Image (tube, grey):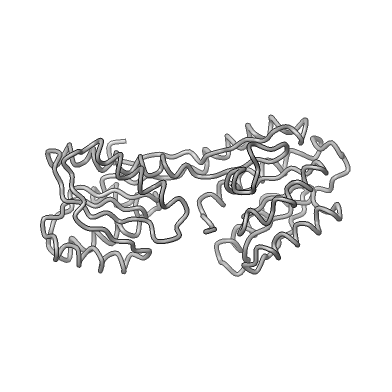
Amino acid sequence: MKINPFAAVAALACLLLTACGSSSATEAGSLPQTVVFSVPSLQVEAMKQMATGVEALVEPKGWKVVAQDGNMDGQQQAQQLSVVVASGTAGALWIIALSPPSLTQVLRDAQAKGIPVVTNGAPKDYGFDGPQPGITFSTIDYGKYGQNAGTALGTCITEKLGGEAAVVWGKPVAGAAGKEEMEKAQLAALQAAAPKARIVSEVASSTLQAAQTDVGNALQGHPDVNAVMASVDEVALGSISAFASAGKDLPCAVSNGGGEQARAAVRAGKLYATVALQFQDDVSQCFDALLAMRSDPRKVGDQLYVPQQVVRTDG
């Protein structure tokens, strides 16, 4: 299963709130103020930075952080977590699961000990039939994520191009989290918002440079292209460069991502919209989940979704 960094950051916010407010909430009462932060690999710079961030925020509040490096091995990650749960050294678990099915027993063991858990994904990813006591799951609604992008592009085509456009579709790369849901939702939303829009070329690029090349090639084969629907910021930004190099205008382009470069392109009028995940807002909903569980760590946890915002120059 691919690791989605967006969902990982959202789950981090949940854990910080859970950890910092749950010492009096555990049924065991004697659980240590120790947060076990388990990731697929601390050799991945983003995950290493997250571990540092956990320490900086949690330790001043009297909590110890134990970061576990799974070395990109799902079974090793499960074994490491099993040890701390069995030993009683974990007061809270936050997990970015490399292989959710391998952690089902770990989660059950944590439940039995009243150890609160926040993990990425959904109950079904771990073999559960539904929501679970003492566990909060956090994920991204990829269908909504794709729908927001498709609707935004269709709106731009209607507003600026009279409802007709030749579109380059920057699809998620193979293996990307939520790929099928996003694609289905993007296409359906675009067709609903701008029925006369035509997909004339498809690309699947993961870097800005590759996207610039791929979209440039698409322009050579389809010189009438005047819109881009990108599943990541890099494709949208690469498209802007490709059109500029070809001396063409790009009146309608949208992206999923919402990174700072994409936001800057929106402000500059080069990108019509970008769909951004709202992690600060996610903190609030995670805090609500904490309040519901703090008096009873065995209370059924929530399935949370990271809030989204369509960022446009007009608001």
Image quarter of the N terminus: bottom right
Question: Is 48 in front, or is 79?
Answer: 79
Judged left or right of residue 8, residue 208 is left
Query: In the rendered image, which quarter is residue 117 located in?
Result: top right
Image quarter of the C terminus: top left
Q: Residue at x 34, y 63 (%)?
A: 205
Judged left or right of residue 138, residue 168 is left
Can see residue 60?
no
In the rendered view, tell whether residue 245 sits above or below residue 162.
below
Number of numbered labels in the structure image: 0
Q: Position of residue 287 (x, y in %)?
A: 63, 35
Judged left or right of residue 67, residue 137 is left
Q: Position of residue 133 (x, y in %)?
A: 72, 36
Q: Position of residue 112 (x, y in %)?
A: 81, 43
In the rendered view, tell whether residue 63 sits above or below residue 25.
below
Q: Residue at x 37, y 44 (%)?
A: 146
Q: Residue at x 31, y 53 (%)?
A: 230
Judged left or right of residue 87, residue 144 is left
Can see residue 174?
yes
Question: Is 52 in front, or is 18?
Answer: 18
Q: Residue at x 58, y 39 (%)?
A: 283
In the rendered view, tell whether residue 203 sits above or below residue 105.
below
Q: Position of residue 176 (x, y in %)?
A: 45, 57
